[in-house]
Image: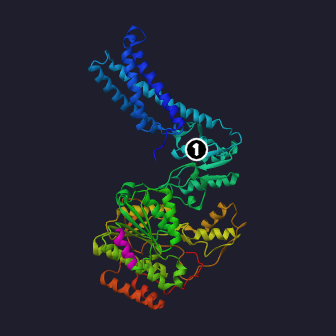
């Protein structure tokens, strides 16, 4: 339905008409001065006024100048005004020159037409700028004497956006008191009238010497060490602090003050973002039919969210759990209302159902995130691990090859390296299936391997949070236990980058940074909860379980890897893998053993097939163990 003009837009139209008349009169007054010559050109001026009053508002309407909220006007709106005035002035000039050549009126000053164009820009643009200034003054004049004073850490684009939102909104009980930024060129400068009062290292001094009620960290690209330093100082001073999400979290969203949130453990572990290579991702996903298996899981949902921003022709969300797929669907429809999305309830083990969906939707790119991943649960359900992680992967890969899927990426795990558990072993066989299909077909099928992601279902962080909520204790096997950790948005972004790099048969490993002590992670979570480790929440060490590694590996011992165009992605050189007929027979045999419920033989066979595997030598972990 076409929007009707509002009373406000009618007032703006009336103002434009008056300013267009003033511009026409002023152009000749400036050109000829007020005198006999001006009076002689009055008929021409009347023609200019008449044509302009008709033509210019029509073009202004066409370019949307009467549908804008001018209190939010920016450089983009200014550019639009210039374009609308220029176009309409050209039409007016052509009409007047044509009428003059036909003898409709005598005397025409072409330089006056140019002056009229300039005056119209100045007057109509100035009119709208005045509306913005008045609106801003009205909002700034709202009584904020009781408002809390916020110190903004980061005087870049994000910090400026936060300040603008604080200034515009009378509902937010915050007013910006100053910026901190390490850029020396910004020192003692002002942004939207708010001064830069020092560097980030001056935070403690500023908090001691100024009345600050809250600190806002507005640096999406800030590494964890900056977030940690700011949060530690604020905690010591008793000042509340919040942050803007990291750059990877904002990839598909819009930065605004409403995205501010409490500092989370993921912020303390942020790494400085590597060089962003968006062009390759766009070429891989834009206009393609993209399928994500396991779309209701932590990784699958974030894959869907980030893929959606690249404008695929259609997004196929395939998953076994209807509730998780429904929640993901609602999330995406709210953020990307114009994107064609198909929620597909399907188990990858159901080959017939999967083939029907492949026939119907013809995906071109597939991201395979569907898997059983909880280590202790798979030790209790070995047959299910084989059925889902191996046979399900085989179904998907075989059907992808037969249906000409151009690109497939399997999400794998560091636990597939020298596996000591069934989950890792079945994921390693799944990797072999993908790499063998790439070798046979020549298609761009690849594997991306990474470690733990923070916040995923069943991960250590939610378990620690539940233990803290109960009042402790937090249980850790060993004080030197270390694991790789990465945030879900960063891991998924690098998966998409890997997909754009793959030509077929590659195993990519993500740069997980340094391994993190689980003890440090637990202590950070306790502090973020406003408590003190050892005093409010006890940490208990339960002892290393048999076969458990103190640290993890991302590739086999002695394996070499090569850099890729992205500094956080490495490509492993060829590894000793099963392939061809030998792999096919092995998968068939594992499937037969799983169907017969012979878990002991499955474990023995996995150990025999995978280099360095020690599954049968490792006692199964407790069902509620943290891996």
Residue at 42% across, 15% down: 29
Q: In the image, is residue 64 above or below residue 588?
A: above
Give the position of the C terminus as an image quadrant.
bottom right
- In the image, is residue 354 part of the stretch drawn in magenta? yes
Q: Furthest residue to the right?
A: 535
Density class for disc 1 (Cα within 10 Å; few <14, some 14-19, many ≥20) is: some
| Number of marks in picture | 1
122 or 302, nearer to the observer? 122
Is residue 563 shown to the viewer in this render? no
Q: Furthest residue to the top?
A: 36
244 or 265, nearer to the observer? 244
In the displayed structure image, the side of residue 466 where residue 483 appears, left or right: left
Q: In the image, is residue 454 above or below residue 225?
A: below
In the picture of the structure, the residue carrying the numbered disc 1 is: 165
Horizontal and vertical percent for residue 494?
A: 43, 62
Task: Say how the picture is coloured.
Answer: rainbow
- In the image, is residue 574 part of the stretch drawn in magenta? no
Residue at 53% across, 70% down: 323
In the displayed structure image, the side of residue 399 where residue 179 appears, left or right: right
Horizontal and vertical percent for residue 301?
A: 49, 65
Judged by its main secondary structure, the magenta piece is helix
Is residue 146 shown to the viewer in this render? yes
Horizontal and vertical percent for residue 293?
A: 43, 71
Q: In the image, is residue 427 above or below residue 225?
A: below
Residue at 34% across, 75% down: 399
Query: Which range of residues does the magenta coloring cover?
Result: 352-362
Q: Quadrant of residue 56?
A: top left
Horizontal and vertical percent for residue 112?
A: 37, 19
Check disc 1 and report its element: helix, strand or loop: helix
């Amino acid at each position: 339905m076409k929007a009707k003009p509002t009373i406000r837009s009618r007032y703006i139209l009336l103002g434009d008409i008056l300013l267009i008349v003033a511009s026409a009169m002023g152009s000749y007054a400036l050109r000829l001065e007020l005198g006999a010559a001006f009076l002689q050109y009055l008929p021409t001026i009347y023609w200019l006024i008449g044509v302009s009053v008709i033509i210019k508002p029509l073009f202004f309407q066409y370019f949307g100048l009467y549908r804008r909220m001018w209190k939010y006007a920016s450089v983009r709106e200014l550019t639009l005004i210039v374009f609308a005035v220029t176009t309409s002035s050209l039409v007016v000039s052509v009409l007047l020159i044509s009428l003059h050549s036909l003898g409709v009126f005598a005397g025409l000053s072409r330089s006056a037409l140019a002056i009229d164009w300039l005056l119209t820009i100045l007057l109509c643009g100035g009119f709208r700028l005045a509306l913005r200034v008045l609106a801003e003054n009205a909002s700034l004049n709202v009584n904020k004497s009781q408002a809390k004073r916020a110190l903004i850490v980061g005087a870049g684009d994000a910090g400026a956006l936060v300040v603008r939102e604080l200034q515009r909104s009378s509902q937010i009980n915050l007013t910006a008191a100053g910026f901190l930024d390490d850029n020396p060129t910004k020192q003692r400068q002002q942004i939207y009238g708010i001064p830069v009062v020092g560097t980030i290292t001056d935070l403690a001094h500023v908090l001691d010497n100024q009345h600050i009620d809250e600190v806002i960290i507005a640096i999406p690209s800030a590494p964890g060490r900056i977030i940690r330093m700011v949060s530690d100082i604020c905690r010591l001073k008793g000042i509340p602090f919040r942050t803007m999400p990291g750059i990877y979290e904002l990839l598909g969203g819009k930065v605004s003050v409403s995205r501010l949130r409490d500092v989370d453990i993921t912020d303390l572990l942020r790494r400085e973002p590597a060089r962003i290579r968006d062009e390759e991702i766009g070429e891989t996903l834009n206009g393609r039919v993209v399928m994500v298996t396991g779309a209701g899981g932590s990784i699958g949902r974030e894959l869907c969210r980030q893929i959606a921003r690249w404008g695929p022709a259609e997004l196929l969300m395939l998953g076994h759990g209807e509730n998780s797929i429904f929640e993901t669907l609602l999330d995406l429809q709210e953020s990307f209302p114009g994107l064609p999305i198909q929620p597909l309830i399907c188990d990858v083990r159901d080959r017939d159902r999967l083939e029907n969906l492949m026939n119907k939707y013809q995906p071109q790119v597939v991201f395979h995130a569907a898997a059983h991943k909880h280590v202790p649960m798979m030790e209790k359900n070995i047959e299910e691990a084989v059925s889902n992680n191996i046979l399900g992967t085989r179904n998907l890969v075989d059907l992808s090859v037969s249906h000409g899927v151009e690109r497939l990426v399997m999400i794998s795990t560091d636990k597939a390296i020298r596996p000591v558990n069934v989950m890792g072993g079945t994921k390693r066989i799944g990797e072999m299936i993908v790499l063998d299909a790439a070798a046979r077909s020549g298609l761009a099928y690849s594997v991306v391997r990474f470690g733990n992601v923070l916040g995923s279902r069943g991960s250590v962080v939610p378990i620690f949070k539940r233990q803290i909520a109960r009042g402790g204790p937090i249980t850790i096997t060993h004080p030197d236990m270390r694991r790789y950790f990465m945030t879900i948005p960063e891991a998924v972004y690098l998966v998409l980058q890997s997909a754009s790099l793959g030509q077929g048969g590659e195993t990519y490993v993500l740069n997980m940074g340094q391994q993190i002590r689980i003890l440090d992670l637990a202590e950070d979570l306790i502090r973020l909860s406003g408590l003190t480790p050892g005093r409010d929440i006890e940490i208990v060490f339960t002892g290393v379980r048999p076969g458990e590694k103190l640290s993890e590996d991302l590739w086999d011992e002695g394996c070499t890897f090569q850099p890729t165009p992205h500094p956080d992605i490495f490509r492993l050189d060829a590894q000793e893998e099963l392939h061809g007929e030998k792999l096919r027979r092995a998968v068939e045999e594992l499937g037969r053993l799983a169907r017969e419920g012979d878990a002991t033989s499955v474990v023995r066979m996995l150990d025999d097939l995978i280099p360095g595997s020690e599954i049968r030598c490792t006692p199964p972990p407790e069902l509620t163990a943290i891996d």
